[in-house]
Amino acid sequence: MTKISKVSKFLGQIGLTVVLGSIVGACGGGSTPNSASSPAAGSGDYVVGMVLVGPKNDAGWNQVHFEGIQSAIQKVAGTKLEYVDKVNPGDRPNVKGSQVADDLIAKGAKFIIFNSDDFKDDALETAKKHTNVTVIHASGDYAWKDGKNFKNQANLGNIMGRMEYGKMIAGCTAALGTETGKIGYLGPLINDETRRYSSAAFLGAKYCWETYRKRPASELTFKVTWIGFWFNIPGKTLDPTKVADDYYNGGFDVVMSGIDTPEAAVQGKKAAEAGKKVKYVHYDLPTGCSLAPSICLGVPFYNWSIPYADALQKAKDGKYTSEFVWSGPDWQNLTNPTAGMIGFNPGQALGENQKFLDEFVKGMSSGSINLYKGPIKFQDGTDFVKAGETATEQQIWYMPQLLAGMDGPSK
């Protein structure tokens, strides 16, 4: 693959296992790291510091990052992990990500990972301040020489997965699973990444609705509701529980998650138990369908251990140089969490429609299906991709609007 190439009050309800002890809260603007290492990792002389925007056991974005770096630690001998989670305005209103990184580095970290788009400036600040430390920002584009925001910072790298493809597959399952033609998308805050992902989900849904369901696009509703952050912050965001309930109670029989936490699944399970014929599509975590197996259409997921282990080994060997990694799926092993960085696990609720999803994936793999071929319009009627053209990497990454046919604000 070319190298241009998201706490929840439901955690107790869904019985997630807490792998490590709870972190000590921030005090006086600082924070106390927790340690995690594996016997297979050796002496642990090389310290990896991770700054997580949410809780490490959120059944989504943060958990899959945490599990990914744990796996990477096991692969790279002589390393150990120090981490701080819940670094966000709700849990730690007076703490910056760069402050947390300073604390981790003071305790010996030589390799720092920031796991949220919100940390882009913290990552750059940390890299500039600690030039002998390798800094990785999951998301972001400061290391992308062909991007709009390139910073020539040798010890700063960006790693991101091409979840556009996972979201297209997820959107396809939503279209295959809906009976009302109404798909709700639970969105976080609004930025290029979230517009990119929700638009990709729409493109997948539209294609499979028209191609396999044989229904016109005019009969498909794809609505995005933005809550205002990656997860619920009471008093600051919309409550994703209420947003999910509003969808399920308002005729939307499929809800797709684009946030870090499992409200789409939890509220979907409650709606199904109340007799509603609903389904959901999870996000981030390979085991997301286990939250409500009978109504899960599938889950697109990340495998962060692959790029994390690669970058970590390079840094430990003194060979790391700034790179922008935007890594995609291994199309032949989509369900294998150790293959490509992007995967997809179909859910029970997909049923006999699995054959259509297989056909869709096969077409994407071969290139016979390319949903980024024009003409594609933005919501305001202007061109995203003109007829006869295919979207460039920059057009895809820097998504300024939602697409025509989507319901929801772009800004």
Image (cartoon, rainbow, N blue to C red):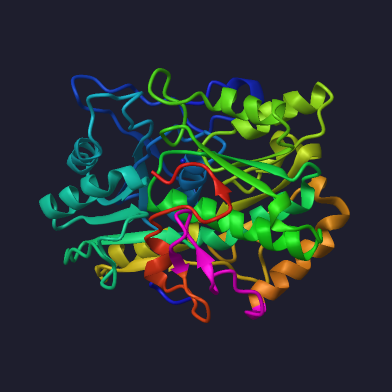
In which quarter of the view is residue 289 placed? top right
Q: Residue at coordinates 50% horizontally, 38% vertically from top-left? A: 260
Q: Residue at coordinates 43% horizontally, 19% vertically from top-left? A: 234
Q: Is residue 16 visible?
A: no
Nearer to the camera, 363 or 379: 379
* Location of residue 264 in the rendering, given as x and y in whole percent from the top left corner: 63, 34
Direction left: furthest residue: 129
Q: Is residue 35 above or below residue 141?
A: above
Q: Residue at coordinates 40% horizontally, 62% vertically from top-left? A: 397
The quadrant the C terminus occupies is top left
In which quarter of the view is residue 182 placed? top right
- The answer to whether residue 278 is left or right of residue 77 is right
Nearer to the camera, 214 or 148: 214
Q: Is residue 178 visible?
A: yes
* Location of residue 328 in the rendering, given as x and y in whole percent from the top left corner: 52, 67
- The answer to whether residue 208 is left or right of residue 198 is right
- The answer to whether residue 357 is left or right of residue 265 is right
Direction front: furthest residue: 381
* Location of residue 65 in the rendering, given as x and y in whole percent from the top left corner: 46, 47
Q: Main secondary structure of the magenta part?
A: loop
Count of marks placed on residues = 0
Q: Which residues are magenta?
A: 366-384
Question: In the rendered structure, does residue 190 fall within the stretch colored magenta?
Answer: no
Q: Is residue 88 above or below residue 311?
A: above
